[in-house]
Amino acid sequence: MNMHQTITRKLEQALSPEHLEVIDESHMHNVPEGSESHFKVVVVSNAFKDKMPVARHRMVNKALQEEL
C-alpha cells in the first residue's frame, strides 16, 4: 500500500468524511522522483462540527501520527 492509500484509509476510518481529497504534491518539492513526502488533504466531516480549526487539525494529525 502506498502513502496516498494509507492516508486515505486512515482518514476514512478516523473521520468518516463526507468529502476527502488526498493530493500528492511531492513533485512540487526538491525530493527524489517517486517520493511520497508532501500531501495536501481536504476533509469535510461531521466529526469537525463545533470544533475550532486547530482542534480539527489535531484530529487529522492524530489519525496520521505514524506517518507524521
Image: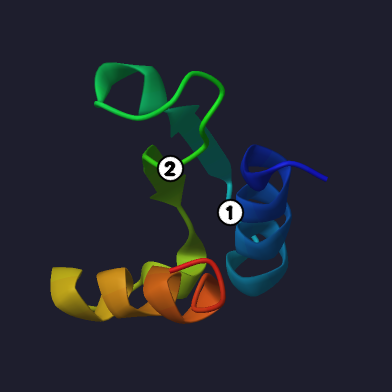
Tag 1 residue? 17
Q: Nearer the viewer, residue 24 or 63?
A: 24
Q: Quadrant of residue 14?
A: bottom right
Q: Is residue 58 left or right of residue 17?
A: left
Establish if 52 lies above or below 44: below
Give amino acid for label 1.
Pro
Residue occupying image coordinates x 24% and y 81%: 55
Residue occupying image coordinates x 46% and y 28%: 24
Q: How many marks?
A: 2
The residue carrying pointer 2 sits among few (fewer than 14), some (14 to 19) or many (20 or more) residues within 10 Å by Cα, namely some
Task: Calculate the distance from the C-alpha at mark 1 to the C-alpha at mark 2.
Answer: 23 Å
Tag 2 residue? 37
Residue occupying image coordinates x 39% and y 73%: 61
Q: For the C terminus, which image quadrant?
A: bottom left
Q: Is residue 59 visible?
A: yes
Establish if 6 lies above or below 10: above
| SS for callout 1 | loop
Task: State the image coordinates of residue 51 (x, y, percent, origin top left).
Answer: 25, 79
Q: Nearer the viewer, residue 27 or 55?
A: 27
Q: Is residue 3 left or right of residue 13?
A: left
Task: State the image coordinates of residue 57 (x, y, percent, origin top left).
Answer: 28, 69
Q: Is residue 52 visible?
A: no
Give amino acid for label 2.
Ser
Establish if 44 lies above or below 65: above
Q: Nearer the viewer, residue 1 or 21?
A: 1
